[in-house]
Amino acid sequence: MGQTFSTLAYLVASVLFIMALRGLSHPETSRQGNIFGMVGMGIAVVATLLKPGMGAGGIALVIAGIAVGGTIGAVVANRIQMTSLPQLVAAFHSLVGLAAVFVAAAAFYAPESFGIGHAGDIHGSSLVEMSLGLAIGAITFSGSVIAFAKLDGRMSGAPILFKGQHWLNLALGILMLVLVIAFVSSGSPLLFWLIAILAFALGFLLIIPIGGADMPVVVSMLNSYSGWAAAGIGFTIGNLLLIVTGALVGASGAILSYIMCKGMNRSIVNVLLGGFGTTGGGEAGPGAGGGDRAPVKAGSPEDAAYIMKNAQKIIVVPGYGMAVAQAQQVLREMGELLKKEGVEVTYAIHPVAGRMPGHMNVLLAEANVPYDDVKELEEINPEFAEADVAFVIGANDVTNPAAKTDKSSAIYGMPILDVERAKTVFFIKRGMASGYAGVDNELFFRPNTMMLFGDAKKVTQEIVQALQR
Ligand code: NAP
């Protein structure tokens, strides 16, 4: 009876996880998706606690783990800024990887508790699953720690490259394969720990050559790895739910990485081999970075308010700077005031605007911008030619025409929002610094561009005040 109950409960939890992923695929259903995921996890935890043979000691340990981990998680998640989410996700993934290493070690030293044989005589198939979980888990751990350090500015985001790097990684990869085969045929503890050490080193070496700009893709790849590590461990301990959940995380992480690569027109191999990107954004102030180009035209919030009040169609392009400034609420207010003046206002979302997929959608949804006003790149691009104003707030790379014209540019081939086709383009940013990819944007120097220098929230507030006058 107990076993049937937990199997059924796990099945319900698995279905809820799938429904959660489905819900998360659209901003309108994402809250519901989150709730499905939370209920599924709740059911999974209760079913695990009620499993036959758990015992009071086991139940107390699980509850203590949830209390400690849950409290730390809740405090950290509550404190974290939206713009720091990628590094938080990287930090959390490192823990998933480490957990996989611990479970593999527990299964290796206490195989009886997992029903996979006896010490020194573990089933061959279990050794295979265990070594895969161990290796992928350890790579995920050290790789995620480096990704966290790079994203959080604790180490330079610049790619760390040295001669023969890819050959070294290839040689270590082959050595890993040899060690896994030797471990599976011998079950030796020494080989177990050698695999762990080598995998920790590989995780480190694989991530250091990857530049800051590619880090979000890498975090998503590591997310995928952590899922596969969990699935591997699920096989070891014979837990169906862990296999299903691990596979869901593994597959969705891989799909997300693919979507991000497509948004940047990069191949995943190109990302994983590293060497692209800089620490991001130069620090130049207003007026810098122009070289011998035409001077930039800077305007005031009052100028912008006047032009926008008299426009018929405005397309707002939010980017990373809007997230930094937390300007989404005041931006919505500005949009509402303009709509009252009879202006058509829509919001254009680039798939990789900001620092994580869906970043802009989440912020605009939080500010209650109507979903129907928010358009994806393919849908909105033809409309820029008819727009009176493209209002670019804290976006840069996603508008840079170098992606279309300059074959030598790091962002060449990335689809961009065609803001330059609007009659007037406003750029709200603090100075002339480049965006995350570190590429200059020649749009700032075009005659139909007006720069509105300042913090995105402050400038938009001033525009709102001017519109209200
Ligand atoms: P971006 O190119 O990084 O530009 C953001 C701009 O915002 C900067 O030029 C900065 O200029 C400005 N800014 C920063 N703080 C500001 C503030 N408080 N107020 C006003 N402006 C501020 O951003 P993006 O156009 O959104 O492009 C995203 C980039 O991230 C792309 O290169 C993309 O490939 C990369 N990326 C994104 C993802 C993803 O999933 N979304 C994943 C991987 C990589 P100032 O310093 O002059 O103010």
Image (cartoon, rainbow, N blue to C red):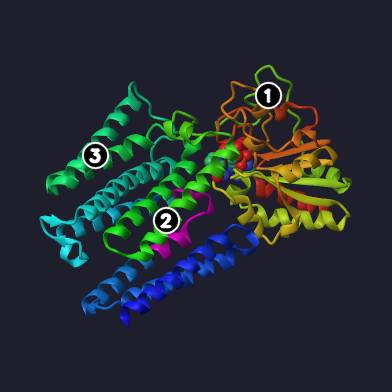
Left or right: where 465 falls relative to 116: right
- The residue that label 1 is drawn on is 405
Name the residue at 76% across, 27% down: 446
Q: Which mark is residue 198?
A: 3
Name the residue at 27% across, 78% down: 52
Q: CA distance from mark 1 to mark 3?
A: 44 Å
Q: Which residues are magenta?
A: 73-88
For disc 2, does the CB lie below 8 Å from ligand 1? Answer: no
Q: Nearer the viewer, mark 1 or mark 3?
A: 3
Q: Nearer the viewer, mark 2 or mark 1?
A: 2
Q: What amino acid is at disc 3?
A: Leu
Check the image and name the residue furthest to the bottom. 1
Q: What amino acid is at disc 2?
A: Ala
Dot 1 falls on a residue whose secondary structure is helix
* Horizontal and vertical percent position of residue 148: 40, 45
Dot 3 falls on a residue whose secondary structure is helix
* Horizontal and vertical percent position of residue 451: 73, 35
Left or right: where 273 falls relative to 167: right
Secondary structure mostly taken by the magenta-highlighted segment of the chain: helix
Check the image and name the residue furthest to the top. 292
Residue 290 occupies quadrant? top right
Q: Residues within 10 Å of mark 1 (few under 14, many from 20)?
A: few
Q: Residues within 10 Å of mark 3 (few under 14, many from 20)?
A: some
* Horizontal and vertical percent position of residue 310: 89, 46
The earlier-in-sequence mark between 3 and 2 is 3
Is 144 placed above or below 242 here? above
- The residue that label 2 is drawn on is 247
Name the residue at 12% across, 56% down: 121
Does the magenta-highlighted stretch encompass residue 229?
A: no
In terms of depth relative to the viewer, which is nearer, 160 or 202? 202
* Horizontal and vertical percent position of residue 371: 71, 58
